[in-house]
Image (cartoon, helix red, strand yellow):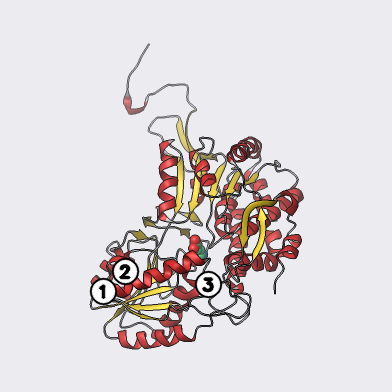
Amino acid sequence: MYEPESLMKELGVDFARWHGGDLVCRSPIDGRELARLRADRGADCAAKVGRAEAAFIEWRRLPPPRRGELVRLLGGQLRRHKEALGRLVTMESGKILQEGLGEVQEMIDICDFATGLSRQLYGLTIASERPGHRMMETWHPLGPVGIISAFNFPVAVWSWNAALALVCGDSLVWKPSEKTCLSALAVQSLLEQAMREFGEAPADLSQLLLGGRECGMMLAQDTRLPLVSATGSTRMGREVAQACAARLGRSILELGGNNTAVIAPSADLELAVRAVVFAAAGTAGQRCTSLRRLFVHASVYDRVRERLIAAFRSLAVGNPLDAGTLVGPLIDEHAWTVMQDALRRAQAEGGRVHGGERVPVEGCDGGFYARPALVEMPAQGGVVQEETFAPILYLLRYQTLEQAIAWNNAVPQGLASSIFSNDLREAELFLSPAGSDCGIANVNIGPSGAEIGGAFGGEKDTGGGREAGSDAWKNYMRRATNTINYSSELPLAQGVRFSI
Ligand code: UN1
């Protein structure tokens, strides 16, 4: 059915270097063992950070547009190997092939963005209050950057961080999810191939750490890493943030979401239903931006509910490598148990559950396939407040937009939100300071599937970090403020007199 070994070969992975340990890689498609790899121990982690630190000293000296050239070459490798890497991502994460390919495209896009950015790392010139003086700010490379990434976007999230960090002059230490190590090995190999083509990069520029929570925590605690960027659960983010803060390091946190769509009376219902189904059921509900709460105006509630029940029932759940499949497996048995537990709790809280059952898939007995669940809820208490990483969509009926906005904001998380409305006043209110409190707020598209050009991230329990586009690059540099006196006088700021 699929051959990870040949894909790894095509992607240039030196398997012997990692093979033969106790870190078991499995495919969520059928539970099959793909490989056993050697995990890094504490001393390996420390040594790799040391190597990245030494590489940084060299890398930061190269002019940014030269550093951009390496990222351009990485983009070229990704373009050439998009199909193989996309397939590998599908095998390891269980997302459908279209989405595996889409994830690699997201990497290519951020490489293009970062290459252009390498000629645009500019600061301000600021008026000085003193005659014959000029002020400016300069952006400098920061240091080796720690990247902790999750299983659901095993390669794209690395690239948002890595492409920017590289053009900013930083070296990398990457700890991927232990559930998606093969995809990480493949990406590391493509970067190493790009480095060979480039010829000017220090060999230790990018370090890959394989291992579990302890490895991630070592990065968070390591004073040699001025910045750690972490994507995953709010629980994990809290631990990383506290460990970083304790040593006054910086962190970028991309944590849980509890994302929404509001369907207003004027909405184009056809378009809204399509968007909602993609956002809730796509990636089997395992995006941090997946739609989890849907607020539908009372006047269109019954129509939307019927359409969604029918759409969820007919969704093709199956092997993510098969062309017709729209919903692949959950990542593992634990995810399935958590999903079933949430559905039971929703029922106990007065919810009416449609779907959510296990779907048998031929040849994939060891995989956990679930029919996406639509759950009509009387109110947004208990379980609706939580992010359950599974395809569960809670449906609530609202009367006024103010009520829907209040519900949108009344959860701990603050990542992504959306409104379907053709009424300008409603749409603008949703985007206004009195509207959604999320880092992402959309009109007439769902909350997931962001482009890389915008800053990505959210507020509250989502962690407050911003990655990818806009000016997120500033996180990966340090800012120096420079005052230059080109006169022969020495006036002091604030008019202070100090004559000797
Ligand atoms: C994630 O789930 O961690 O906006 C990232 C999106 C994707 C990225 C999701 N571009 O859905």
Q: Secondary structure at mark 1?
A: helix
| Residue 382 coordinates in the image, percent (x, y) | 29, 66
Among numbered discs 3 and 2, the one appearing first in the sequence: 3
Q: Residues within 10 Å of mark 3 (few under 14, many from 20)?
A: many
Amino acid residing under circle 2: Phe
Is residue 50 visible to the viewer in this orientation of the structure? yes
Q: Secondary structure at mark 2?
A: helix
Classify residue 356 by image quadrant: bottom left
Q: Which residue is mark 3?
A: 368
Which one is in front in this view, the residue at disc 3 or the one at disc 2? 3
Amino acid residing under circle 1: Leu
Spatial separation of the CA atoms under disc 1 and disc 2: 9 Å
Which one is in front in this view, the residue at disc 3 or the one at disc 1? 3
Among numbered discs 1 and 2, the one appearing first in the sequence: 1
Q: Which residue is mark 1?
A: 401
Is residue 260 visible to the viewer in this orientation of the structure? no
Residue drawn at (41%, 76%) of the image: 444
